[in-house]
Image (spheres, rainbow, N blue to C red):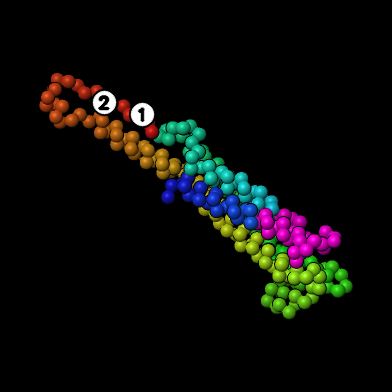
């Protein structure tokens, strides 16, 4: 697969993941699917906007760059050594790195939130009743949270989704780092194919035919020039 086509495929996958991460983070502001009376009752990790900023906004820019790589040609001269394809692939490495950092930010926040557990009302105060992720393996501990209703499965589901999706985003951006590096060093496969076609046509047109040499031996055939692809 060509480097540009591969990048476009990665960008197409990153867009819906970024939208889903943003929606998951927004839903976390409504514990148990309900509006809280006091914003201080919302789990603190939600306010770091891991899904909105890290896996959302910061992921949109790399995705758009990846989508445009297939048709991006700064110089408009695919067969030229100074073609903008290489620079475009190099720039994609920078944006892919930004994507890895954004996804990593969301991944770490989600892991911390899952380990800490949600903030809830235990009957006496609003606090974090769980320690070191002990509630993950012992569902009976969920009863410690009396309010909001179903806050534990709500947070567990959404933060788990953020953890998985941000991990996938980090892997996809990592693939583009390798893909962009190969495209920078080797050039896009379309450019390589274009150069081969131009070289083959040039050799074919510059070679005089045997029949022409017999009929017109005194005529010197001038080589044809083939414009670069």
Which residues make up the magenta segment? 21-50
- Between residue 99 and residue 124, name the one nearer to us: 124
Image point (65%, 56%), residue name: 21
Helix, strand or loop for disc 2: loop
- Between residue 216 and residue 38, name the one nearer to us: 38
In the image, residue 10 lies at what x, y percent?
Answer: 53, 51
Tell me which corner region of the image, top left, top right, bottom left or bottom right, holds residue 77: top left
Q: Is residue 8 visible?
A: yes
In the image, residue 11 lies at what x, y percent?
Answer: 55, 49
> Disc 2 or disc 1, which is closer to the eye?
1
Do tag 2 and tag 1 residues touch (Cβ < 8 Å)?
no
Figure quadrant of the C terminus? top left
Q: Is residue 215 above or below residue 160?
A: above
Label number found at residue 140: none
State left or right for residue 38 relative to residue 95. Answer: right
Image point (72%, 54%), residue name: 49
Q: Is residue 181 above or below residue 134?
A: above
In the image, residue 157 lies at what x, y percent?
Answer: 67, 67
Magenta span: predominant SS is helix
In the rendered image, which residue does mark 1 sit on? 227
Number of marks in the rendered image: 2
Measure the alpha-carbon separation of dots 2 and 1.
Answer: 13 Å
In the image, residue 70 lies at what x, y percent?
Answer: 48, 43
Helix, strand or loop for disc 1: loop
In the rendered image, which residue does mark 2 sit on? 223
């Amino acid at each position: 697969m060509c480097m540009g086509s591969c990048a476009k495929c990665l960008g197409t996958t990153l867009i819906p993941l970024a939208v889903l991460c943003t929606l998951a983070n927004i839903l976390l502001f409504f514990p148990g699917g309900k509006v809280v009376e006091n914003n201080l009752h919302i789990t603190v990790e939600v306010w770091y906007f891991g899904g909105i900023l890290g896996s959302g906004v910061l992921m949109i820019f790399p995705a758009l760059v990846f989508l445009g790589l297939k048709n991006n040609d700064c110089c408009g001269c695919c067969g030229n050594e100074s073609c903008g394809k290489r620079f475009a692939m190099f720039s994609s490495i920078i944006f892919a790195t930004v994507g890895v950092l954004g996804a990593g930010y969301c991944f770490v926040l989600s892991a911390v939130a899952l380990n800490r557990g949600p903030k809830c009302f235990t009957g006496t105060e609003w606090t974090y009743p769980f320690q070191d992720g002990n509630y993950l393996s012992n569902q009976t501990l969920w009863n410690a949270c009396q309010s909001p209703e179903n806050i534990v499965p709500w947070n567990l589901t959404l933060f788990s989704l953020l953890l998985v999706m941000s991990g996938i985003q980090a892997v996809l951006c990592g693939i583009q780092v390798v893909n962009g590096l190969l495209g920078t060093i080797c050039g896009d496969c379309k450019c390589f194919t274009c150069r081969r076609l131009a070289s083959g046509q040039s050799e074919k047109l510059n070679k005089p035919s045997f029949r022409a040499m017999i009929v017109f031996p005194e005529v010197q055939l001038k080589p044809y020039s083939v414009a670069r692809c």
